[in-house]
Amino acid sequence: MKANPSTVNIVTMGCSKNTVDSEKLSGILAANNWKVFFDDENSSHNAVIINTCGFINDAKRESIDMILKFAEEKKRGKTGKLYVMGCLSQRYGKELKSEIPEVEGYFGVTDWEGIASALGIKYKKEYTEERIVSTPSHYAYLKISEGCSRTCSFCIIPEIRGRHVSAPMDELVQEAQLLADKGVKELILIAQDLTYYGVDLHKKPLLANLVQKISEIQGIEWIRLHYAFPSLFPSNILEVMRENPSVCRYIDMPLQHCSDGVLKKMRRGTGQANITSLINKIRKEVPGVAVRTTLLVGHPGESEKEFEQLKQFVRDMKFDRLGVFTYSHEENTLSGENYPDTVPPEEKERRANEIMSIQQQISQSLNAQKTGKTFRVIIDREESDHYAGRTEFDSPEVDPEVIIKKPGKLVPGNFYYVKIDSASEFDLYGSVINEDL
């Protein structure tokens, strides 16, 4: 391998917030004349940087497996220096260094300066602003804050990433403008907690103000909201969503549970009555809005009765999109330290499967209602026999797609009006009516 690396492979594990971190790192590397690859498994590189996830056990195992994979490739001379960053190394850096010494350096979640020093390159904060988008060029994630000030008992994120820190609004608007200049048409706003944006800086939530400013940027046609917290939800964002055509009628709000007893143990700061009232308010004030949520099953003390209550809640609320994960007993969390992990792993899996079985029926019914209707669709990619796109009600990678059969020539990144011909619980199938001009 060359003494001075010229190509680097950034491998990103975990959530979209890690994706943004990797992209910001790519800006630093590119400013130093390195050629950056993302998640490249086919070529050897002078350096590999793995951005890890350390949220739950499954994610930790996947990150460790990825480190071991590249450590083995390094031993066989297939790749150069190996570095690890992100949540896992922030949390377990000392242990990882002892167990996997093949790695040249372990760094925290955004230790840009440390990584730059290890690589022998220059670091300037402004380099991160010229991030290389690793997603398809027409959409990108915009991380509006770092950390979290909530005290959910099952969550390790505040310990890993610290308390909530909002990015200054002018910096975010500037970043959004830079992304628009690069051809980004859809911005997906992300954070550990979108709804807290601005509170730490100005003593009041400013998410609606931020979204309004970004919507004024020419070229940004869709703005999507991910990871809103149900407690202290800023209702003024609903007016912006309803009245501003650039703001997708879509909101991702992880609720975790509905049982008052479980929510209290989780320290979520809300209860079923308030959650139900909020979801009904969102649907009333923004007609046609798609609500996505995430649920957690198997939390310590979750009884069969409380689980049945959750199942009925899912049936009653009929969420447009729903994901579920099983509780992971984490050290240094309130649940991990104060409650025994009473629900066996196989029972957690059974509960998760039951929830998803209910949701599949709901999704199939809701998708079937779209048959015969026409939607504005953005094309994400071309496959051998079809194109895949999304409506404003679907986020990339996690939600259903609109499948459009060939022949016909569509351009990824462009919008088209598509009539839905049929539907399944997973996807919609349609035909192009005309291109959106």
Image (tube, rainbow, N blue to C red):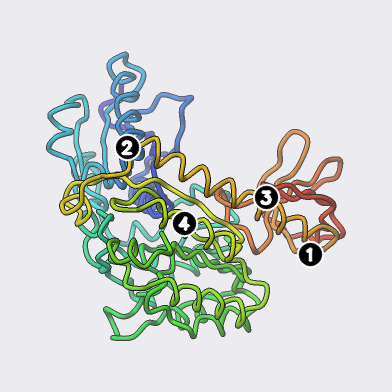
Residue 265 is left or right of residue 349, and the answer is left
* Separation of marks 1 and 4 at Cα, in angstroms: 33 Å
Report the residue marked by disc 4: 294
In contact (CB < 8 Å): disc 3 and disc 4: no
What secondary structure is found at the residue carrying circle 3? loop
Residue 49: numbered disc: 2
Instruction: Tell me which label, 1 or 4, sits earlier in the chain.
Output: 4
Judging from the image, what secondary structure is the residue with disc 2 in? strand
Q: Nearer the viewer, residue 437 or 305?
A: 305
Task: Kindly report the distance in space between the C-alpha atoms of the residues bearing marks 4 and 2.
Answer: 30 Å
In three-dimensional space, the C-alpha distance between marks 3 and 4, rounded to whole angstroms, equals 19 Å
Residue 401: mark in rendering: 3
To which residue does mark 1 refer? 436
Asked if labels 4 and 1 touch by Cβ distance under 8 angstroms, the answer is no
Asked whether the beta carbons under mark 4 and mark 2 sit within 8 Å of each other, the answer is no
Task: Report x, y in % for residue 274.
Answer: 43, 77
Q: Amino acid at mark 3?
A: Glu
Tag 1: residue type?
Asp
Question: What is the x, y in percent for residue 202?
Answer: 30, 85
If you read the primary sequence from the N terminus, does the residue marked by circle 1 or circle 3 appear first?
3
Q: From this viewpoint, is residue 266 visible?
A: yes
Q: Nearer the viewer, mark 4 or mark 2?
A: 4
Vertical arrangement, residue 185 with respect to residue 173, above or below? above
- Image side of residue 178 versus residue 201, left or right: right
- Callout count: 4
